[in-house]
Amino acid sequence: MKLGIVGLPNVGKSTLFNAITNAGAQSANYAFCTIEPNVGVVAVPDERLDKLAEMYSPDKITPAIIEFVDIAGLVRGASKGEGLGNKFLSHIREVDAVIHVVRCFEDDDIVHVDATIDPARDIETINLELIFSDIEMIERRMEKVGKSMRGDKSFAAEFDFLTRVKEALESNIPARNIECDENESKWLAEVALLTAKPVIYACNMSESDFSQGIEKNANYLKVCEIAAAEGSEVLPICAELEAEISSLDKEEKEMFLADLGIESGGLDLLVKKSYSLLGLISYLTAGKPEVRAWTITKGTKAPQAAGKIHSDFERGFIRAEVIAYDDLIRMGSMAAAKEKGLVRSEGKDYVMKDGDVVLFRFNV
């Protein structure tokens, strides 16, 4: 999973990226501090792996991973090449989902590219640049499909759909909010539109906002309204605070957050929202050599899940021996779970569930 962190210059993107990844990306108080995208790979927090490790004492623990890409700040006119716009837009095209960092805090010492704090304006600035770029992409695709349609009328349905998408974009409706049937979804995927990507609005707030109550921050509430209207997720976060706690160990971090009255750190919440947004789940494998989490899409069947480990597992799939994580922990061991009949033998049509602990049987 690859998540792109976007936003206007100086909203806290690189600070958040550094906090999440401990990658040490450059962060400074001027526009275009980030030119080439910084990339960081982060382990997905999963307490289930720790519990399984206690049970199996494995030689290795391997969590699922997420790749975060810190993309340089977009500015008004980016779709026409302003700033370093076209290059930045191409970086967004390569990610699975967008984390749109929106500045919701006041600080006279940190310059805003538009001089004032206005999340609605900032979101519109970014969204319009993505939409302008998408309209250009749609027009190119329409031209190509239109030529094909002259000799084959079967392309007419796709052309009509593309026309509908263009009209929606021109009405400032992002592609992700356009209803599609199965064929239309395939056509949309072929164009790879920027506004088709799911979005999490990360509201960058001050530490005092969290201690006083985030609902008192009018800027945050504005973002919530915008996100609700377009079906996107919202994550209140303090990039500076995340940077402070990123170097703490687990116990220190928990104590620090408890003092502020916060249950979970921003990374944990961001990962959970990202998984939900992209329709992802994790299944687990456990044994003495390794305890590991594997990321798959909801609805994945057992052979395809096995293929995540190795293509031979999918090609020679026989069956999957499956137990729910909660059942395994409750029983205390795989042997006890088998005695109680909690380990199931599942075939090729089994749809994997989040937290399944699996042993795949195969033969090639």
Image (cartoon, grey):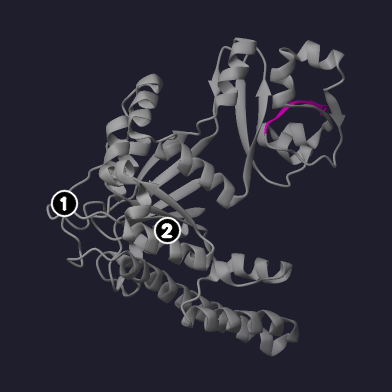
3D distance between C-alphas at marks 1 and 2: 23 Å
Say which residue appears at 33% left-offset and 34% top-offset.
260
Q: Quadrant of residue 55?
A: top right
Query: What amino acid does circle 1 point to?
Result: Asn
Please report the bounds of the magenta region as a residue range. 355-364
Q: Quadrant of residue 192?
A: bottom right
Residue 256 location in percent, x, y? Answer: 33, 27
43 left or right of 335 in image: left
Say which residue appears at 32% left-offset and 55% top-offset.
217
**Residue hosting label 1:** 29
State whether residue 36 is above or below residue 184. above
The answer, for residue 350, to whether it is visible in the render is: yes
Residue 343 location in percent, x, y? Answer: 82, 23
325 left or right of 229 in image: right
Residue 181 location in percent, x, y? Answer: 71, 70
Is 359 colored magenta in this rendering?
Answer: yes
Q: Between residues 260 and 241, which one lies in front from this camera angle?
A: 260
**Is there CB contact under 8 Å for labels 1 and 2?**
no
State whether residue 256 is above or below residue 77. above
Is 195 colored magenta in this rendering?
Answer: no
Query: How many other residues sit within 10 Å of disc 2, few (<14), some (14-19) or many (≥20)?
Result: many
Which quadrant is home to the C terminus?
top right
**Residue hosting label 2:** 92
The answer, for residue 193, to whether it is visible in the render is: no
Number of callouts? 2
Q: Nearer the viewer, mark 1 or mark 2?
A: 1
Q: Between residues 17 and 290, which one lies in front from this camera angle?
A: 17
Query: What amino acid does circle 2 point to?
Result: Ile
Residue 25 location in percent, x, y? Answer: 27, 41
In the rendered structure, find residue 179 and report the number of the disc placed on it. none
Say which residue appears at 85% left-offset and 27% top-offset.
344
